[in-house]
Image (spheres, rainbow, N blue to C red):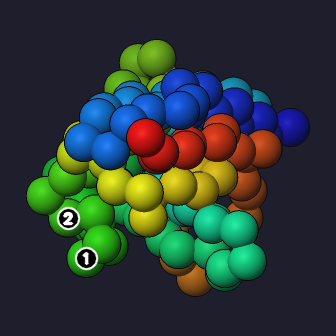
Amino acid sequence: EVQLVESGGGLVQPGGSLRLSCAASGFIFSSYDMSWVRQAPGKGPEWVSAINTGGGNIDYADSVKGRFTISRDNAKNTLYLQMNSLKPEDTALYYCARGREGDSDSWGQGTQVTVSS
């Protein structure tokens, strides 16, 4: 059974940083591209970032480019999202997803990120 468990969310002031983690199990993590997706209240999902199996092919949404960094540790079956210079508009439920936009088949339960003073 595919399991994706996100952690690291919380309440942070504007300009602050958070690091999200996603622990993967139940499949061969190193064989799949992985993504982070977020959904703010009342809005549809936004694909934030994606990374290929080896970590050499990375994409970011324009809204987070230069502020967020995706990475993965295939030895630890873990996906990360380092978020810096956080803005109130980054407030959302952040999901780890197996695959990329258009071909994703599993999401985690999500971790809440709230950016507020």
Where 54 sits versus 105, above or below? above
Name the residue beneath numbered marker 1: 62
Circle 1 SS class: loop
- The residue tagged 2 is 65
Q: Nearer the viewer, residue 62 or 58?
A: 62
Amino acid type, label 2: Lys
**C-alpha distance separating marks 1 and 2:** 5 Å
**Where, by quadrant of the figure, is residue 43 drawn?**
bottom right
- Amino acid type of the residue tagged 1 in the rendering: Asp
Q: Is residue 32 visible?
A: no
Q: Position of residue 82 (x, y in %)?
A: 31, 37
Density class for disc 1 (Cα within 10 Å; few <14, some 14-19, many ≥20) is few
Position in image of residue 99 (x %, y %): 55, 62
Q: Quadrant of the C terminus?
A: top left
Q: Are marks 1 and 2 in contact (CB under 8 Å)?
A: yes
Q: Secondary structure at mark 2?
A: loop
In the figure, is residue 89 to the left or right of 67? right
The residue sitting at 37% across, 61% down in the picture is 49
